[in-house]
Amino acid sequence: MDSSEIKQLKLLANKARTGAIIGTYHAKSGHPGGSLSAADIFTYLYFKEMRVDPENPAWEDRDRFVLSKGHCCPSLYAVLSLKGFFDWDELLSLRHVGAMLQGHPDMKGTPGIDMSTGSLGQGVSAACGMALAAKLDNKDYRVYTVLGDGEVEEGQVWEAAMFASHHKLDNLVVFVDQNGLQIDGPVTEVAGIEPLDKKFEAFGFKVLKIDGHDFEQIKDALDTARTVKGMPTAILAKTVKGKGVSFMENQVGWHGVAPNKEQYAQAVFELKKQALEIKGGLD
């Protein structure tokens, strides 16, 4: 990618982060911290990597995406809106009764959502099923899923990993958003998961480690994943919880708390300032 492409991706990710703040503020609830940490991954997947069609969300040959850490959907919703699946104003009614965008992804009510998720560990299992279905149907679509690092403590994740390796699902890419924090505190203190790379390798995965906020590294990892044959790929992405909003960064308290009016104004101000800085560097 050239510098202008990277800058455009940065602007889209910035907008996605802003959307997550807008949504959680108007909902008065939600999960901003992990939404902000995963925004760059969502942005790259939908604007560079995945084969999707907003005009035909149920297209049979589309690539599939499963947000296994379903509570972090606010920034995913923003990315889907930016891609053209639905209007931006839908973010204003996040989590409202009867609204399109609920607190966890709903495949029946939201265009662009391929799997309803929320119970941690189940999303990656569904992604494995989708990847196996592609193999059985001789389809070339690929399946992507994002897990939280706290979610990896779930036993079902490792059952899914065994399944993926056993069936040689080389059309499956598992991202782990390693922001280091979960609802009860630092992952290392709640139930340490390291060495995570060795664990995925032992379960039969090709493992890649990246900075989850670096678009070049995200690109290189996904390009490598496409060359892997006979095994699934796990991309361990180091990220910052609350990325982009100074008072939310690396603060476990922002796992599941919405900003108040003053915090909302400050967050949007900071993100707008970052957008201007990015635009200032455009060719």
Image (cartoon, rainbow, N blue to C red):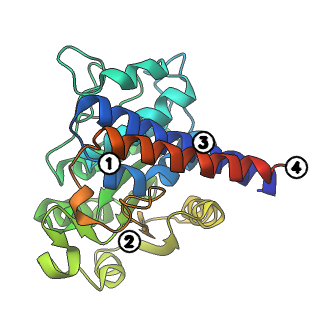
Instruction: Give the structural element (helix, strand or loop) at label 2.
Output: loop
Residue at (27%, 33%) from the top-left corner?
A: 105
Give the numbered dot on residue 110: none
Do labels 2 and 1 touch, CB within 8 Å? no
Residue at (29%, 27%) from the top-left corner?
A: 94
Closer mark to the observer between disc 2 and disc 3? 3
> Please, is residue 246 above or below residue 111 in the view?
below
Give the CA separation, mark 3 to mark 1: 17 Å
Give the CA separation, mark 2 to mark 3: 31 Å
Residue 66 at least partly seen: no
Q: Earlier in the sequence, mark 3 or mark 1?
A: 3
> Relative to 215, is 251 on the left or the right?
left
Give the CA separation, mark 2 to mark 1: 30 Å
Tell me the kind of residue under disc 1: Pro
Q: Earlier in the sequence, mark 3 or mark 4?
A: 3
- Across and down, in percent, residue 207 comes to 44, 74
Q: Earlier in the sequence, mark 2 or mark 4?
A: 2
Quadrant of the drawing holding the N terminus: bottom right
Tell me the kind of residue under disc 4: Asp
Give the CA separation, mark 2 to mark 4: 40 Å
> Relative to 82, is 38 on the left or the right?
left
Do labels 3 and 1 touch, CB within 8 Å? no
Depth check: 278 or 204 in front?
Answer: 278
What residue is disc 2 on? 205
Q: Residues within 10 Å of mark 2 (few under 14, many from 20)?
A: many
> Please, is residue 124 above or below residue 217 in the view?
above
What residue is disc 4 on? 283
What residue is disc 3 on? 12
